[in-house]
Amino acid sequence: DNTPPVFTACPGDMTINLGPGECSAVLDFAIQALDECTPVLGFLPGGPPVEITNNNVFSSASLNNSIVCTANPFSTLQAFNLATIGYPDPVIIESLEFIVWSAINNPSVTVNIYEYSTPIPAPNVNLNYANMTLLGTGTNNVPNFAGGAGNGLSHTVPLDVPIALAGNNIVLELVTPGLAGGFIPGSNSAGFIQGTCYFAGCGGIYPQPVPMATLIGNLHWMAKLHGTIGLANPNASLP
């Protein structure tokens, strides 16, 4: 990064008493500093931009249904393998975009990106949070919006820190306050390239992500990852 570090703890004035005939002395002291440098594994951003979606169709105009759990809060998720949908090489992910059906009172939402440690389950099988390792997260507020079929709001949540992915099995999660918090995510019926859509939470009813098709029909939460193709970092210090 190009931002210089900020020194947060420096010693105060110190007096050194030299011995007879001494003209200089070495003084050791400790300082503390903060820096914005956040290396991303062995790869750097800066390659060509990339957009990754598991949805067959991703657009505000393709919105044709909402995703609602009667108990709140709840999460909606999707799981897929990056290599299977055409991204085997390293990518640096910086944000997640999704389509909103409606929002009131500027609700706060969180996006999480996990690596899934086992193969993606069959479409009728639950995901398991124990198999998920959190790679990145981000939170912001959704602007007030009253949409509907064919008229969704595209909203993007930046990750707190960019993450590097390379052919991983990944899970995308949108943690929402639900109806009680004035937020309804959108979906469409165009399907996924791989996998299925899941509900989790719902006021504690579903502690593990459950395939949505087994509950309320085969809806498809719309999500898109944004970032860049990863460039090899010659100074990488992380594995």
Image (cartoon, helix red, strand yellow):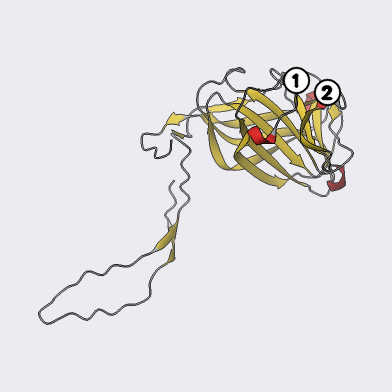
Position of the C terminus, as image quadrant, is top left
Q: Residue at x 55, y 23 (%)?
A: 167
Percent coordinates x, y for residue 49 in the rendering: 54, 28
Cβ atoms at labels 2 and 1 below 8 Å apart:
yes
Mark 2 or 1 closer to N-term? 1
The kind of secondary structure element at disc 1 is loop
Which image quadrant for residue 29?
A: bottom left
Identify residue type, mark 2: Ala
**Horizontal placement of 24 versus 82: left or right?**
left
Vertical comparison of 87 with 72: above or below: above
Q: Is residue 130 visible?
A: yes
**Horizontal placement of 206 versus 164: left or right?**
right
Percent coordinates x, y for residue 103 in the rendering: 82, 42
Viewer-closest of 130 and 71: 130
Vertical comparison of 140 with 207: above or below: below
**Horizontal placement of 150 versus 235: left or right?**
right
Identify residue type, mark 1: Pro
Which image quadrant for residue 132?
A: top right
Percent coordinates x, y for residue 169 in the rendering: 60, 25
Residue, disc 2: 213
Q: Is residue 153 visible?
A: no
Residue, disc 1: 123
